[in-house]
Image: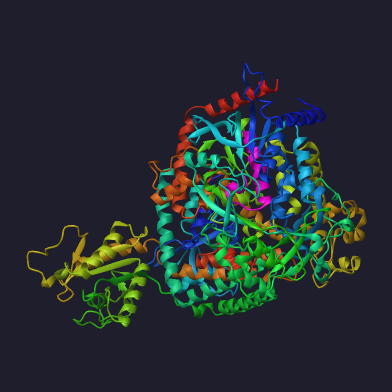
């Protein structure tokens, strides 16, 4: 009985950007039959990373990676050489554990791989697991849900689950936003559009072809589009190792009104002059990003243009980019000039960015924010004269370095919370997910044979589109109908 | 119980009395007798007839109230039934022993299966229907249905009472008040008023209140519903002009001939009533730039097109076709309206221009140069009730025991109406018997897709069925509607006749047996190749092939297989339907295996029921956003599955909801076993009535 719910939540959770929750026939069945895997230890600097699988194919997965050895005894740590099952390339010498169900974390058969924590190793093992038949990357909160489904968690423990799913969905949403911005995102988006259009045209041909006069060659066009897509996907997958440049770490975005000292803060934190600083407002116009080590955690630090209106087109573009980057941030470092809190730009920033994020009303996002009041050296010695509804803040002087220790400690806490959760910055897992679904899409396209049963051909496209929808977050039926009625004059 | 024959006479007799106004119900004057029925159905259209007949088949004493008995079964728009998606619905209505498929098998004049070359999952059974015959046959069927009484009368108001406790709803319906002031009591009421709720007919700039050309609209009832708090919307639709047959020059037009042999709609019919060679052809012509000109020049005379009432995204009228897709030739099918009818229905020419301009437009079309218009095309604007206000059993959230079916829920089409009618009729009857509702899931049928879409998403345009709406399209095929619905209909609702049940059972066991035999026969590919030389089997494959795998090849059918392996397979090739269905099962076997897992998941989520009386707005101890609360409050999903399909309800909200429900269930389980006692009481009640 209970099992169904979790697959349902998984289904709803997997498309956080999708406006319509109704699922077209699409993604492969993620049900009780499937086996999931994920990196279950946190990011950040760690000697050992733990990768977990759950589901009936766990034993198979363990055997595939540790061949030719047999399964280790249940619940006993064993040292094994992990190899990629396809290339037989050695990946790592790792501790592996085998937990046959129901005596496991989720109640299903589980396996754990304790590998050396370098990104190359983790990524290699995740990709190797993705190539084992029946395995797929886990959805947000799926391990916990499975544990609950098998009675491994009590109802009170599940109370936290909704929050977890919410947070993970949010994290995935931000992750998706970042990716959609990038090269790969544009590719995926384009593929999804092509596929949706091709499917819509095949559907139109099925539902209206006989009764209404569709233009000649509707199907031919869809066919050639599908074939082109197949070629593009195939080429991309062969090239996948070089094609993706996903950076690891939490995304920390420094934002604030112009001339608050954002660039100075970035330079201070990265200990090198990343951004040009000047006393002139509007110096930074583009988003500058630099990978840094913040309080021991890997992070991607972004400097943004000061948020203000009514300036030249170049700076406006900078402001637009800054706002976009803000949406994608895991942690916002909001910087205000402590000596200039009453100015209209400070006031605007407080009320449009800081307070909505702190009170959590901004689109229910789970973003974190640290408010930094810079230029404390300019304040009179008895402390700033601040208005009362200011949220919790930190005082800092980028000039003298006063308050930096306090800021680093606060950053450490925030990043520990962020990075301790494996879902926040999962570029490695994301890569495995991408590859898994792109391969699934390609396989499904291989079943598209319009010369035979057209309903079967359309089904192949539906499954293919379902895979892409998991990456781009769309895929409802209404979208198909919209295209049909836009492109064709049909109906009685 | 009545015998079937006796019952028919009784019904017919009671009908005759209806024509003497108030003769029946005024009684002997001293003690006016107020009639009481189990189920009252209002409206005699495609939803109403199916609802009334279904309720009666389920064993309820049913009254069908209609404006005029002679309009029962009227096809007020196109003279055809079925098509792609719509044909699927008809097969499902038939699987539940509904009427329209059987009546179509007796009344068609041109039978054709659409999409023959596109795969059996999307075959569209379709027929041109003789309007007069359909009406006659439908009326005969309705007037001879045991337990079903027909009465003429317009309903003005509903009789309401306090709601039953422990159930959602502000009121409970107890019956109806007619225009003449008389009342009829009922335990359930089904409303199928079509376009009659504040219906307005539009031709050019003229508007007339009417549900259909020549019929009065229902205004009082619309006001009652609005006063009760139902959310009402407005939709529009249209119908083309009718043309005199003898005024058309068919000789210069493309002719479409019917299928030979004809495929019947109903599972219980082997053939249709008429031979292919006696059937009528259809003809095809096209619009031209002159038609565009007339429409574009006269838009100012066309208020139906201008107004903001929502029409569909697809193009129902020639005006919207010309406006949205200019400079194209649009198809016009000239469809016969009947065997001895001299009227032609120009499909695709739905128009609301002033009548004289319609005639002018028609005569510039090829083949229609001398055409005479018999009746102008017109538009209809009407009220519909937001279908998120009803449950999947089609009962309203607001008024207990009140059911809505058909166009009133925002759908368009005879088949969509009929499908809702059957479900409403069955559930109205089950409600009287205190039995659980009969709900078809999205995984079980197009009926389920239709009702789930309506009740969870609502609709802002007339909703029409397309096969692309069904995510499990390969499983929900016209050929297997009986195996999906007939058994449930027989066991859970009692709406299926013994004869149909037995036929479906025979077919089911034959199919299962046939498939297992086909799986058990295995030869090498070279042996298959030598047995069936015409097969395109590659002999390079080393693994043995099952007969079922061989049947997947397009050029192979059961007859060919039976010739190759006669001793095992001959018996399965004799029955045409069985042989065809085995072939279809083989075609989709691999994909269906995949789809079944996905369907199971949907079914599991639908098995998780939400309490009916949950007040989402005030519910405490559950963290739900205001937006989600309002959405849940309005649609009142009955299962976790339905809740998850409501746009805007987040995964986290679903988990929270479930935790709440699970906790409540545990608490309830600890207390009494009162629901079971209720059930028991009902059963006793039923027993007494039978005695």
Is residue A272 positioned above or below B249 on the image? below
Classified by dominant secondary structure, the portion drawn in magenta counts as helix
Report the residue at 28% width, 73% height from top: A307
How far from the left and from the top, in percent, is residue B661?
A: 47, 41
Question: Where, quadrant-wise, is the C terminus of chain A in this rendering?
Answer: bottom right
Question: In front: A313, or A398?
Answer: A313
Question: Where, quadrant-wise, is the N terminus of chain A in this rendering?
Answer: top right
How many marks can you see?
A: 0
Q: Is residue B306 magenta?
A: no
- Magenta region, residue range: B405-430
Is residue B607 positioned above or below A417 on the image? above
**Outermost residue toward the left?**
A381
Is residue B431 positioned above or below B344 on the image? above
How far from the left and from the top, in percent, is residue A102?
A: 54, 48
Query: A320 left or right of B126?
Result: left
How far from the left and from the top, in percent, is residue B627?
A: 41, 51
Residue B551: image quadrant is: bottom right
Q: Is residue B426 magenta?
A: yes
Report the residue at 29% width, 77% height from top: A305
Residue A450: image quadrant is: bottom right
Question: In front: B542, or B225?
Answer: B225
- Residue A55 appears in view: yes
- Residue A456 appears in view: no
How far from the left and from the top, in percent, is residue B97?
A: 74, 42
Question: In front: A415, or B2?
Answer: B2
Is residue A238 positioned above or below B535 on the image? below
**Outermost residue toward the top?**
B30
Scheme of image coloration: rainbow
Query: A250 left or right of B80?
Result: left
């Amino acid at each position: 009985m209970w099992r169904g719910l979790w697959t349902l939540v998984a289904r709803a959770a997997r498309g956080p950007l999708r406006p319509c929750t109704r699922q077209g026939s699409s993604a492969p069945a993620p049900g009780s039959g499937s086996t999931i895997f994920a990196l279950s230890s946190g990011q950040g600097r760690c000697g050992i990373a733990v990768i977990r699988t759950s589901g009936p194919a766990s034993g198979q997965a363990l055997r595939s990676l540790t061949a030719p050895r047999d399964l280790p005894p249940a619940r006993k740590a064993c040292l094994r050489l992990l190899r990629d099952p396809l290339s037989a390339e050695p990946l790592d010498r790792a501790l592996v554990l085998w937990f046959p169900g129901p005596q496991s974390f989720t109640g299903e058969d589980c396996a754990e791989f304790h590998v050396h924590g370098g990104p190359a190793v983790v990524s290699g093992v995740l990709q190797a697991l993705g190539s084992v038949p029946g395995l797929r990357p886990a959805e947000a909160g799926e391990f916990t849900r499975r544990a609950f489904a098998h009675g491994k968690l009590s109802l009170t423990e599940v109370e936290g689950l909704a929050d977890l799913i919410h947070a993970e969905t949010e994290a995935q949403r931000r992750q998706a936003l970042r990716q959609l911005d990038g090269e790969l995102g544009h590719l995926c988006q384009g593929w999804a559009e092509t596929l949706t259009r091709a499917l819509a045209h095949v559907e139109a041909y099925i539902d209206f072809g006989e009764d209404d006069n569709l233009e000649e060659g509707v199907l031919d066009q869809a066919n050639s589009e599908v074939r082109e897509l197949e070629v593009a996907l195939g080429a991309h997958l062969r090239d996948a190792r070089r094609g993706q440049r996903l950076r690891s770490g939490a995304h920390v975005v420094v934002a604030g009104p112009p001339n608050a000292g954002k660039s100075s803060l970035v330079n201070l934190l990265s200990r090198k002059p990343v951004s040009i600083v000047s006393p002139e407002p509007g110096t930074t116009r583009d988003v500058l990003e630099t990978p840094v080590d913040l309080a021991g955690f890997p992070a991607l630090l972004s400097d943004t243009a000061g948020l203000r209106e009514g300036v030249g087109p170049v700076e406006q573009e900078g402001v637009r980019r800054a706002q976009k980057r803000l949406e994608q941030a895991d942690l916002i470092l909001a910087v205000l000039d402590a000596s200039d809190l009453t100015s209209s730009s400070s006031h605007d920033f407080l009320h449009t960015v800081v307070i909505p994020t702190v009170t959590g009303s901004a689109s229910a996002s789970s973003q974190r924010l640290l408010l930094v009041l810079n230029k404390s050296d300019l304040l009179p010695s008895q402390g700033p004269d601040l208005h009362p509804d200011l949220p919790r803040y930190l005082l800092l002087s980028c000039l003298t370095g006063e308050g930096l220790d306090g800021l680093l400690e606060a950053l450490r806490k925030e990043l520990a919370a962020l990075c301790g959760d494996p879902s926040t910055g999962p570029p490695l897992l994301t890569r495995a997910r991408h590859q898994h679904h792109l391969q699934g899409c390609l396989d499904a396209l291989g079943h598209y044979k319009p010369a035979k049963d057209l309903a079967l051909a359309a089904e192949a496209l539906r499954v293919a589109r379902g895979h892409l929808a998991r990456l781009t977050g769309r895929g409802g039926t209404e979208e198909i109908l919209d295209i049909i009625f836009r492109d064709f004059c049909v109906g009685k | 119980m009545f015998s079937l024959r006796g019952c028919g006479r009784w019904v017919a007799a009671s009908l005759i009395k209806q024509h003497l106004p108030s003769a029946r119900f005024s009684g002997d004057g001293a003690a006016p007798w107020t009639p009481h029925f189990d189920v009252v159905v209002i409206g005699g259209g495609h939803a109403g007839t199916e609802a009334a007949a279904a309720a009666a088949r389920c064993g309820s004493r049913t009254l069908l109230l209609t404006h005029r008995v002679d309009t029962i079964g009227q096809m007020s728009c196109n003279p055809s039934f079925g098509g792609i998606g719509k044909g699927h619905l008809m097969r499902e209505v038939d699987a539940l022993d509904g009427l329209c498929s059987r009546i179509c098998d007796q009344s068609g004049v041109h039978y054709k299966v659409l999409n023959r070359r596109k795969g059996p999952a999307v075959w569209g059974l379709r027929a041109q229907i003789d309007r007069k015959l359909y009406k006659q046959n439908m009326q005969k069927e309705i007037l001879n249905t045991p337990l079903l009484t027909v009465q003429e009368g317009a309903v003005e108001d509903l009789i309401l009472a306090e709601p039953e406790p422990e159930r959602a709803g502000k009121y409970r319906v107890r019956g109806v008040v007619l225009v003449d002031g008389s009342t009829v009591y009922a335990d359930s009421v089904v409303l199928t008023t079509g376009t009659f709720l504040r219906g307005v007919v539009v031709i050019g700039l003229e508007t007339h209140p009417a549900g259909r050309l020549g019929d009065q609209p229902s205004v009082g009832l619309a006001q009652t519903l609005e006063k009760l708090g139902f959310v009402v919307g407005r939709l529009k639709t249209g119908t083309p002009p009718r043309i005199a047959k003898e005024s058309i020059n068919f000789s210069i037009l493309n002719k479409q001939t019917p299928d030979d042999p004809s495929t019947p709609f109903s599972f219980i019919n082997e053939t249709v009533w008429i031979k292919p060679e006696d059937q009528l052809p259809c003809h095809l012509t096209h619009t031209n730039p002159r038609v565009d000109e007339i429409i574009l020049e006269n838009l100012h005379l066309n208020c139906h097109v201008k107004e903001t009432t929502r029409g569909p995204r697809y193009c129902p009228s020639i005006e919207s076709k010309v406006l949205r897709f200019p400079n194209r030739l649009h198809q016009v099918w000239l469809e016969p309206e009947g065997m001895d009818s001299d009227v032609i229905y120009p499909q695709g020419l739905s128009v609301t221009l002033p009548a004289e301009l319609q005639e002018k437009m028609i005569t510039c079309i090829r083949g229609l140069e001398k055409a005479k218009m018999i009746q102008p095309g017109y538009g209809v604007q009407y009220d519909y009730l937001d279908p998120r206000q009803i449950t999947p059993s089609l009962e309203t959230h607001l008024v207990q025991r009140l059911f809505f079916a058909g166009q009133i829920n925002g759908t368009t089409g005879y088949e969509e109406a009929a499908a809702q009618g059957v479900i409403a009729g069955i559930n109205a009857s089950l409600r009287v018997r205190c039995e659980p509702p009969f709900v078809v899931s999205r995984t079980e049928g197009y009926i389920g897709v239709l009702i789930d879409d309506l009740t969870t998403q609502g609709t802002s345009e007339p909703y029409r069925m397309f096969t692309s709406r069904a995510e499990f399209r390969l499983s929900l095929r016209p050929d297997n509607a009986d195996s999906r619905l007939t058994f449930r209909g027989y066991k859970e609702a009692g709406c299926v006749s013994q004869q149909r049940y037995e036929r479906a059972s025979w077919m089911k066991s034959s199919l299962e047996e046939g498939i297992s035999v086909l799986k058990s026969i295995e030869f090498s590919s070279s042996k298959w190749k030598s047995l069936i030389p015409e097969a395109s089997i590659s002999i390079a494959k080393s693994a043995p092939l099952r007969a079922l795998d061989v049947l997947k090849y397009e050029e192979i059918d059961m007859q060919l297989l039976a010739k190759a392996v006669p001793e095992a397979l001959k018996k399965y090739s004799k029955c045409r339907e069985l042989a065809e269905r085995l072939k279809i099962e083989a075609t989709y076997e691999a994909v269906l295996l995949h789809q079944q897992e996905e369907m199971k998941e949907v079914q599991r989520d639908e098995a998780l029921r939400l309490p009916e009386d949950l007040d989402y707005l005030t519910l405490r101890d559950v963290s739900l956003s205001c937006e989600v609360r309002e959405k849940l409050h309005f649609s009142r999903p009955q299962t976790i599955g339905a809740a998850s399909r409501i746009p805007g309800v987040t995964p986290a909200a679903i988990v929270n909801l479930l935790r709440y429900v699970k906790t409540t269930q545990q608490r309830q389980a600890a207390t009494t076993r009162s629901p079971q006692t209720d059930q028991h009481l009902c059963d006793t009640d039923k027993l007494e009535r039978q005695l």
